[in-house]
Image (cartoon, rainbow, N blue to C red):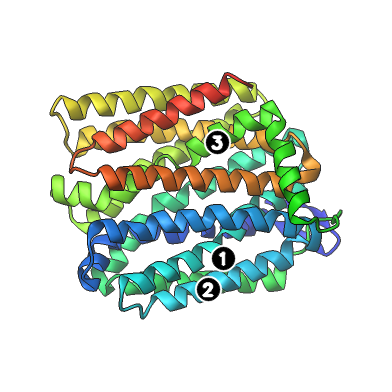
Amino acid sequence: MKLPLTRAGRASLPLLVAVTMTGTVALHIFVPALAAAAADLGTTPVAAQLTITLYLVGLACGQLVYGPLSDRFGRRPVLIAGLSLYLVGLLLAIPAQSIGVLIAARVLQSLGACGSLVLGRAMVRDVSTSVDAARKIAILTMAMTLTPALAPAIGGVVNEAFGWRAVFVVLAALVAFLGALVVFTLPETNRQPVALPGIGAVAAAYLRLLRAPVYRAYVVAGACAGTSLYAFLAVAPFLLVDRLGRSSQEVGLDCLVVVLGMVVGSAVAGRLAGRVPIRQAARGGNLLCLASALALLGLDLGGQLSVTTLLAPLVVYAVGIGVLGPNAVAGLMNVDPHAAGSASSLYGFLQMGFGALFTLAVASWHDGSAAPVATTLLVASLIAAFALRRV
């Protein structure tokens, strides 16, 4: 499937999807190896979980920069710079001998990887009409959900066979390959570059977007939908292994089952695009999230927690995210198409910022039960529901 012509040729949607997916693959592929890395480096589970939380912080902060830079200098050169930084961070993580070095490498990875998230969305929006944006973003989102679905399973297999350091070797090879494709095949999609504003002007542009009630509503709902499930992924290795007796390879498969629900939800969102109003579809997805989070909390408090009763509500929650997420993104990106880069950056910042808070909350509260995860998901769903009332 190809996107419309640009001045340098054709922009491939599959390549843009693959590039966007790399933004979070390093987050998810390392989840099954967390416990092994903590044991090898002689650190605590809480310290090991910082490799997840601080990765999200890096993704959040870096995205504020990539959007305005790409609006001025073009998407392609800024994307190449981000992928290069990403690769350097991966190569530094491979020989890490302490948790401090590993965390620093993870932050560097995130600062490079966040460019893929911002620019993948912006490049798709560059060559899409407002009517077609929801459908293409649904395709993009559906493909992106394969990252948290497949990456943990791959990470678990690689960790079991070769150790946790091999996870970064595999990922470095992938990023290098995609970077080469970008350099040699991906054209520029930003046909109307704008002057690079100062910090004050950038802040003013973000404030202008936030003053728009529709943007504000969709960005909050989308941020909650996009990263709330990270609360489960951050503690999955410890909850499933320590409480429910699963192996690290089974943890990867369990995460795969959960996140496949997002694939189903994104497919549903794609089918609904153009048939059901964006606001109505977003609210329907969030309703699924609310119901499943309540069910999980009730099952845990009632002493009924098992692998099945943990995963089943989480799968339904993931379906809800898959429906809500692309509709929220389409809604916020349509507020001001001329500021697609900035709109994407601000959304990415808030999304990953919320994700960092969610993972920090469950890591700090982790007590071996599913209550912290269920409560965090419930709070995220309530915030999204309140925001969507303002559309």
For marks 2 and 1 on the same chain, the one whose residue lies earlier in the sequence: 2
Q: Residue at x 45, y 45 (%)?
A: 355
Q: CA distance from mark 2 to mark 1?
A: 8 Å
Residue 147 in sight in this render = yes
Label 3 is placed on what type of residue?
Answer: Gly
Q: What amino acid type is highlighted by mark number 2?
A: Leu
Residue under pointer 2:
87
**Residue 18 % position (x, y):** 57, 58
User: Measured along the vertical axis of the image, is residue 81 above or below residue 134?
Assistant: below
Q: Residue at x 73, y 64 (%)?
A: 76
Local SS, label 1: helix
Q: Secondary structure at mark 3?
A: helix
Type of the residue with mark 1? Gly
147 on left or right of 15 = left
Circle 2 — which element?
helix
Q: Specify the quadrant of the image occupied by residue 131.
A: top right
Q: Which mark is residue 222?
A: 3
Label 2: how many Cα within 10 Å (few below 14, some 14–19, many 20+)? many
Q: Are marks 3 and 1 in contact (CB under 8 Å)?
A: no
CA distance separating discs 2 and 3: 28 Å
With 342 as the anchor, is 315 left or right in this view?
left
Among the two numbered marks 2 and 3 on one chain, the one whose residue lies closer to the N terminus: 2
Give the residue displayed 56% in from the left and 34% down from the top: 220
Residue in the picture at 78% in, 61% down: 74
